[in-house]
Amino acid sequence: DAGVIQSPRHEVTEMGQEVTLRCKPISGHNSLFWYRQTMMRGLELLIYFNNNVPIDDSGMPEDRFSAKMPNASFSTLKIQPSEPRDSAVYFCASSLTKEQFFGPGTRLTVL
Amino acid sequence: AQSVSQHNHHVILSEAASLELGCNYSYGGTVNLFWYVQYPGQHLQLLLKYFSGDPLVKGIKGFEAEFIKSKFSFNLRKPSVQWSDTAEYFCAVNEGRGNTDKLIFGTGTRLQVFP
C-alpha cells in the first residue's frame, strides 16, 4: 500500500486566499484524522471522521476551517480566508484498529 | 478528560548513553498505548504499541517500553542511543474499550544525540 497520501506537500499563499489540503487514507481504513503541528502549540487534533462522518471537530480553530470526507478514500481540509497564523504543517492520519498511520504532511505558509 | 504527560521536554545525550523517556497518562480504564517518533522534517511513525499481554514491549530500532499499570506509566527505553535517534518522541493513549481510534498525544520529547 502507498500509505496515507497528502497533497500538496508545500503550499505558499497570501493572506485572505482560500487553501485546500487533500488527503487519501490507506485503503480499508475507516477513521481519518486531521492534525496541525506548530512549534508553539505542538501537535493538535483538528477533526476526525469515522466511516466518513465527522465525530469530533472540537479542535477546529474557528469557522474559517472546514473539513469534508465525501467518500472513504478522500478528505479535504479547507481554510477560507487564510491568515499568517495558520502557517503550520498539517498532517492527515488514518486508522482501522487503533494504530494511526500518518501522511507526509502539508507545509502551509501564509504570507 | 484523558491526558498524557511527558515530563522530559528536551533530552541531550552522547552516543552509547542509555535513554529513558517518561510517559504518564490519566485514564484509569483499559488503555492502548503508543510511542511515535518524528525525525527532523518527517511525519510521525510508530515505534511500538501496547494493547495487552506482556507489559514489556519491544519495538523497532532497539526501543522498548514497559507498561506499569499501577503507575499509569509507559516509559520508553533504549540501552544505547545512536546519533540517528535524534528526533522528537510522542507518547499517546487510546481508550482501550472505546469504539474510537482517537489518540491523546503528549507534548513530545525532543532528543538530541551527539557523536
Image (cartoon, rainbow, N blue to C red):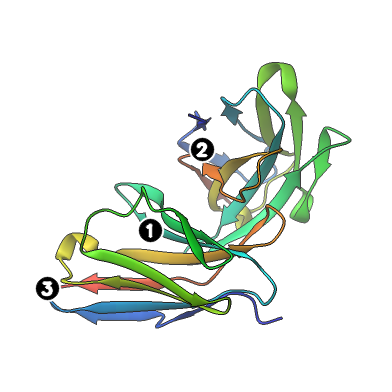
- Residue type at tag 3: Met
Picture quadrant where residue A12 is located: bottom left
Residue placed under numbered mark 2 in the picture: B11
Report which residue position mark 3 lands on: A15
Q: Say few, some or many: other residues with alpha carbon within 10 Å of mark 2 (under 14 / 14 to 19 / 20 or more).
A: some
**Above or below for A51 versus B5:** below
Mark 1, secondary structure of its residue = strand
Does B56 appear above or below A103? above
Q: Secondary structure at mark 2?
A: strand
Circle number at residue B115: none
Label 3 lies in what chain? Answer: A
Q: Amino acid at mark 2?
A: Val
- Specify the amino acid type for callout 1: Arg
Above or below A27: residue A102: above
Q: Are marks 3 and 2 on the same chain?
A: no
Cα separation, mark 1 vs mark 2, equals 24 Å
How far from the left and from the top, in percent, is residue B27? Answer: 60, 26
Q: Are marks 3 and 2 in contact (CB under 8 Å)?
A: no
Q: Position of residue B70 (x, y in %)?
A: 72, 16
Q: Does B12 sit left or right of A8 as displayed?
A: right
Q: Badge 1, how many Cα within 10 Å: few under 14, some, many 20+?
A: many
Label 2 is found on which chain of the structure?
B
In three-dimensional space, the C-alpha distance between marks 3 and 1, rounded to whole angstroms, equals 18 Å
Give the residue drawn at x 19%, y 80%. A13
In front of the other: B83 or A59: A59
Q: Are marks 1 and 2 on the same chain?
A: no
- Crowding at dot 3, Cα within 10 Å, few <14 / some 14-19 / many 20+, comes out as some
Residue named by callout 1: A36
**Near-viewer residue (B26 or A29):** A29
In the displayed structure image, the side of residue B86 where residue A39 appears, left or right: left
Q: Residue B66 in the image: x percent, y percent?
A: 76, 32
